[in-house]
Amino acid sequence: MKQHIKQLLLSACTFFLLCNTHFVLADTASDTETLLNWAEKTYPTIFPSHQATQNIEPWLYRHYPESGIYAGVNKNDNSVYVLGGPWGDNPTVIDTLASL
């Protein structure tokens, strides 16, 4: 009986963790979309056209070929980065996704 209860509790904890992970990933993707859409509307000279968000682990990003700029979120640290244009050839941290 103890083994059955222990197994039930482990299963419940596993399910709970998996569900929370899914929500965190969904929030990160949704927040990234919101941020990048806002950036395109607010700074059209830097992000001159609407681009689709790409996903190459651990990055969610958009590339703006007209300006040579990449903007995105690293899912490992949930920070927002830009690369190219005035930011040069090295990824530059802007802030955390949560802060922005």
Image (cartoon, helix red, strand yellow):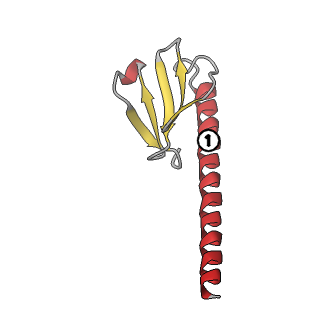
Q: Residue at x 52, y 45 (%)?
A: 97
Which residue is labeled 1 in the image? 29
Q: Position of residue 63 (x, y in %)?
A: 53, 21
Q: How many marks?
A: 1
* Residue type at numbered disc 1: Ala
Question: Which one is in front, 99 or 56?
Answer: 56
Residue 25 drawn above or below residue 87: below
The foreground one among 82 and 44 is 82
Q: Residue at x 65, y 88 (%)?
A: 1
Apparent side of residue 86 relative to residue 5 in the rendered image (left or right)? left
Q: Residue at x 63, y 36 (%)?
A: 33
In the depicted view, which residue is nearer to us: 40 or 33? Answer: 33
- Residue 66, placed above or below residue 93: above
Q: Position of residue 42 (x, y in %)?
A: 60, 28
Judging depth in this view, the residue of 10 and 79 nearest the camera is 10
Could you tell me residue 37's position as x and y percent? 64, 31
Q: Residue drawn at (58%, 20%), measured in percent from left and top?
A: 44
Secondary structure of residue under mark 1: helix
Give the residue at the far bottom of this rendering: 1
Crowdedness near tag 1: few (<14), some (14–19) or many (≥20) residues, C-alpha within 10 Å = some
